[in-house]
Image (spheres, helix red, strand yellow):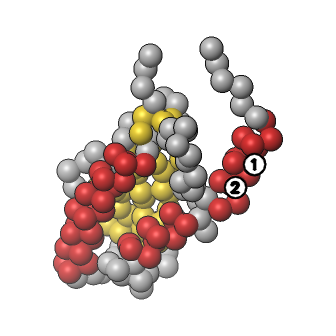
Amino acid sequence: MKENINEHDMTKKMMDIMRGGFKKIMTENETNEYDRDYVIDVKPGTAEYNKQLQELQTVDVDVKIVDFKIYPNEQNVKLIGIYKGNNNAIDSGVHFTFNRNDEEPKITMQDVNLNSEFLTKLQQFFATWKEEWIRELESSYKPKQNG
């Protein structure tokens, strides 16, 4: 038998998420399992976004997040970022994609002068980032079980 959901409580939870980002507000009787196609689009200003940006800026303070999504069912996280350096042209810079399921970050560069230290730091950060997200996904973002 399907459990009745108090619409007021569900609306309140949704509004809390929209106002303050994704929060872990589970009770004993709830699970944190997500539907198959569920994607968490982490927006600027949310706690998780700010945490990731702060950690990423340990590589360089000019690194920016372009897109950040969590895929609970796939047990994956995808973060797309850019580093412009001193060049402000639209397509220039170091563009990178972190995907929890990849072995290394995807990095492309255009019209940017940088030393290898930046790339080394970015790759080292990715290794740490991936391990942290493996633990975070297993503990906080469980896929919904079939059945």
Q: Secondary structure at mark 2?
A: helix
Task: Give the SS element for disc 1.
Answer: helix
> How packed is label 2: few (under 14 Cα within 10 Å), some, or many (20 or more)?
some
Q: Are marks 1 and 2 in contact (CB under 8 Å)?
A: yes
Determine whether 9 is above or below 68 in the image.
above
Apparent side of residue 19 relative to residue 115 in the rendered image (left or right): right
Locate the C terminus and report the quarter of the image it occupies. Answer: top left
Three-letter amino acid code of the residue under disc 2: Asp
Q: Position of residue 42 (x, y in %)?
A: 54, 56
Q: Where's the N terminus, which quadrant?
A: top right
For the point 55% across and 47% down, which residue is it? 26
Quarter of image, res 98: bottom left
Which numbered tag is attached to residue 12? 1
Q: Is 110 positioned to the left or the right of 116 in the image?
A: right
Task: Give the label on residue 91, or none.
Answer: none
**Image coords of residue 100 (percent x, y):** 31, 50
Disc 2 target residue: 16
Q: Residue furthest right?
A: 8
What is the tally of numbered marks visible in this picture? 2
**Quadrant in which residue 130 is drawn:** bottom left
Task: Confirm whether residue 99 shows in the render.
Answer: no
Give x and y (percent) for residue 55: 39, 74
**Closest to the observer: 90 or 29?**
29
Q: Nearer the viewer, residue 31 or 114?
A: 31
Q: Could you tell me residue 133's position as x and y percent?
A: 33, 55
Residue at screen point 72% across, 41% down = 10
Residue 123, placed above or below residue 40: below
Q: Is residue 77 visible in the rendered structure shown here?
A: yes
Q: Within 10 Å of the Cα at label 1, are there few (<14), some (14-19), or many (20+) other Cα atoms? A: few
Amino acid found under the numbered disc labelled 1: Lys
